């Protein structure tokens, strides 16, 4: 069994700051991490490896510095790593990103057939959740998003049973390999790497591929291959007015609460009427 | 991040053969006979955009033929659709990516809408990503605002990124359809107009179950009613880290009970295990739009703000007069939530019971 896990290196969004004048993102000094949602998928792939045996390849598209994320994944137990990097990929939207990643997965499949592709549910920077479905569609793989649990994998029958979160409940789905899976957050606990994996990760000679290595067409990648156009980037407008402060005659909680109730009823007479009507009806 | 681009060249001009794409579609999300309200919110929004463009609103309803499905088609008109594409086949009874994608790709290619909108739900996001790929077109995710740029009649879709710290407006200029997913509760629910009706276009895709690889073995419905309720609650009392310890959550539950509302929380509380993920409000939790949002001990971080700022009335209670939440709340109360929450519960209780006695 060959499993490919797509991981994206993202800026730690908790530490992002916006330049006050130019309104652009200040990335300097912001640490790069593996997209947190990807780790749940990586962990699930490693569990399959532990249970039924598999080769796990991690794949990322990004600048050369994305290598650190691949090494981190290797230290957690991935077997192989591919860095897909090319200036021609810059500016790719999700259609172009999923095309580039698919070209690499196809090349990996030539070496050893890929049975499962894992992606994160979404990223914390682009945050679209579109790359996984894009890859599945391009590969013709069954698409299983928001998976909460992999119930079973039968290698002989090439069958997999999963639980998928939907809006009103959980779908239990049975499908055939190959398929593309995105795990829901919190579905498993991410492991600590073993010492020998950490040593191996540090020395590991990862594969570095570009557009020509995977045979991706130039017109389908980068800005040119992206249908979407970012026409404006801006900081959310602050509300024009700050909150009206509730002032009470006495500084006690009771007085403040009474003043707050009056303020709420005054600002929302309709809501007050509804509440009173409901209370009168004994609800 | 790419710089705002200047409209020029190949990617920015709509080729002649794509100019025949007309009309705005909403893919109506129904699972097991019930429609996700985001679909009606989108039909309402599509109505506004379509009126600007002078085109029709189409609602696409997919499923197995049934009386419930017919009722949904009728509802689509009352919320603002001009035409309903009723796509029925037994294979479409349960949502599965593959048959839904195949059918939607065909229907779009046949009827050529210029804009296709879906809810940013588990179904909508799953399906949108697949269709945008088969149609090789652009898709803007999780939008919070939609508009038409009248100079070139294109869809301008605005969405938060980097956790809501930035907004960006994205367009798909040289490809059709233009696609977007929109978060539930961001657009307001349109009023029903029961006198409205329209055309039904029936589509029979002729699928075979044997061609579909993924099978639904069973469906486990959410038993916890609470889970779905938060997003639709009229009144929400929300707690942040300022409450100090999990035992104090009782204070917000008490107030919510008096008001007949729901309890929401910030992410740190979920991460610390105070309560389940289903109560988290914000970028990675639920978007809510209640009539009243009482935020107790919440600082007002952008990731929380994007989930609740559309509330009609926000009352913030915080010990710190400089807490960012006072920059966007409507009413502010500087004080200790631990004493003010019980006092509010009392005050509301009295106010509402007095009325009951008088009425
Ligand atoms: C401000 C801004 C807004 C944007 N909005 C849109 C938009 O609305 N529509 C659009 O088409 N594009 C958009 N983009 C571009 C988009 O972010 C990029 O295409 C990005 O490369 C992939 O999308 P994502 O980060 O949203 O990934 P998601 O689709 O959220 O990622 C899902 C999973 O796919 C895998 N994956 C994603 N990227 C990579 C990668 N480079 N290497 C390996 N695995 C990966 C990971 O497993 C990840 O968890 C936007 C970009 C910016 C800067
Ligand atoms: C990728 C990402 C996604 C995120 N998604 C979400 C999300 O969906 N939802 C979300 O909420 N957060 C989210 N966050 C976290 C967010 O950035 C903030 O950390 C979080 O909202 C802060 O929660 P808080 O206001 O409860 O806590 P704090 O920021 O610690 O604020 C506590 C407040 O309580 C006040 N206080 C203290 N004692 C009292 C008292 N006795 N009475 C009254 N006030 C008191 C303090 O003055 C302070 O303002 C996300 C973060 C990241 C990086």
Image (cartoon, coloured by chain):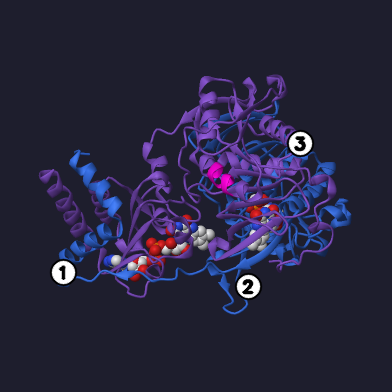
Which image quadrant shows ligand 2?
Answer: bottom left
Q: Chain of mark 1?
A: A
Taking the magenta stretch, the answer to whether it contains residue B33 is: no
Chain of residue at mark 3? B
Task: Check the image and report above or below for A279 versus A268.
Answer: above
- Of all chains in the rendering, the one displayed in blue is A
The furthest residue to the left: B357
Q: Please, is residue B134 above or below residue B157 in the view?
A: above
Label 3 neighbourhood size at 10 Å, few (<14), some (14-19), many (20+)? Answer: some
Count of marks overlaid on the render:
3
Query: Residue B64: which quarter of the image?
Result: top right
Residue beneath label 2, please?
A24
Question: Please, what is the dominant secondary structure of the magenta stretch?
Answer: helix
Q: In which quadrant of the rendered image does the C terminus of chain B lie? A: top left
Q: Mark 3 = which residue?
A: B109
Q: Which residues are magenta?
A: B42-48
Camera-side residue of A115 and A205: A115
Whether labels 2 and 1 share one chain: yes
């Amino acid at each position: 069994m060959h499993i490919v896990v797509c991981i994206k290196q993202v800026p730690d969004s908790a530490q992002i700051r916006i330049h006050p004048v130019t309104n652009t993102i200040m990335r300097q000094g912001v640490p790069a991490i593996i997209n947190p949602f990807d780790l749940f998928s990586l962990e699930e792939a490693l569990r399959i490896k532990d249970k039924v045996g598999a080769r796990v390849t991690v794949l990322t598209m990004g600048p050369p510095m994305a290598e650190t994320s691949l090494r981190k994944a290797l230290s957690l137990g991935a077997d192989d790593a591919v860095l897909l990097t090319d200036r021609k990929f810059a500016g790719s939207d999700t259609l172009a990103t999923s095309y580039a990643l698919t070209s690499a997965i196809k090349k990996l499949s030539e070496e050893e057939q890929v049975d499962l592709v894992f992606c994160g549910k979404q990223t914390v920077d682009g945050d679209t959740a579109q790359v996984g479905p894009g890859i599945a569609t391009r590969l013709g793989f069954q698409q299983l998003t928001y998976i909460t649990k992999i119930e079973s994998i039968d290698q002989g029958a090439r069958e997999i049973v999963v639980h998928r979160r939907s809006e009103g409940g959980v779908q239990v789905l049975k499908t055939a390999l190959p398929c593309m899976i995105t795990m829901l957050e919190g579905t498993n606990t991410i492991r600590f790497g073993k010492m020998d994996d950490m040593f191996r990760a540090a020395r590991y000679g990862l594969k570095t591929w570009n557009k020509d290595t995977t045979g991706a067409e130039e017109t389908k990648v980068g800005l040119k291959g992206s249908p979407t156009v970012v026409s404006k980037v801006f900081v959310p407008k602050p509300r024009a007015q700050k909150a009206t402060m509730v002032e009470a005659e006495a500084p006690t909680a009771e007085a403040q609460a009474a003043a707050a109730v009056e303020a709420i009823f005054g600002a929302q007479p309709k809501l007050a009427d509804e509440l009173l009507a409901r209370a009168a009806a004994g609800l | 991040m790419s710089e705002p681009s200047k409209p020029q060249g190949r990617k920015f001009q709509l080729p002649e053969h794509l100019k025949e794409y007309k009309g705005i579609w909403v893919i109506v999300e129904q699972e097991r006979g019930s429609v996700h309200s985001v679909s009606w919110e989108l039909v309402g929004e599509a109505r506004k955009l379509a009126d600007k463009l002078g085109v029709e609103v189409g609602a696409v309803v997919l499923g197995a033929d049934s009386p419930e499905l017919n009722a949904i088609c009728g509802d689509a008109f009352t919320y603002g659709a001009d035409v309903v594409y009723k796509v029925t086949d037994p294979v479409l009874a349960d949502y599965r990516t593959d048959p839904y994608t195949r059918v939607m790709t065909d229907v779009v290619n046949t009827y050529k809408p210029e804009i296709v909108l879906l809810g940013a739900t588990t179904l909508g996001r799953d399906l949108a990503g697949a269709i945008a790929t088969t149609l090789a077109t652009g898709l803007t995710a999780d939008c919070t605002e939609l508009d038409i740029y009248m100079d070139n009649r294109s869809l301008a879709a605005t969405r938060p990124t980097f956790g809501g710290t930035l907004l960006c407006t994205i367009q798909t200029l040289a490809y059709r359809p233009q696609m977007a997913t929109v978060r539930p509760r961001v657009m307001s629910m349109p009023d029903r107009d029961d006198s409205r009706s329209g055309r039904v276009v029936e589509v029979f895709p002729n699928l075979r179950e044997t061609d579909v690889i993924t099978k639904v073995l069973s469906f486990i419905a959410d038993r916890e009613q609470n889970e779905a309720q938060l997003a639709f609650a009229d009144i929400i009392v929300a707690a942040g880290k300022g409450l100090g310890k999990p035992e104090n959550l009782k204070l917000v539950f008490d107030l919510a009970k008096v008001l007949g509302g729901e309890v929401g929380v910030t992410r740190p509380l979920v991460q610390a295990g105070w309560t389940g993920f289903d109560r988290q409000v914000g970028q990675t939790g639920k978007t809510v739009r209640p009539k009243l949002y009482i935020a107790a001990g919440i600082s007002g971080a952008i990731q929380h703000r994007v989930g609740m700022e559309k509330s009609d009335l926000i009352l913030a209670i915080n010990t710190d007069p400089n807490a960012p939440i006072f920059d966007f709340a409507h009413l502010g109360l500087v004080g200790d939530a631990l004493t003010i929450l019980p006092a509010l519960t009392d005050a509301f209780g009295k106010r509402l019971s007095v009325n009951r006695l008088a009425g």
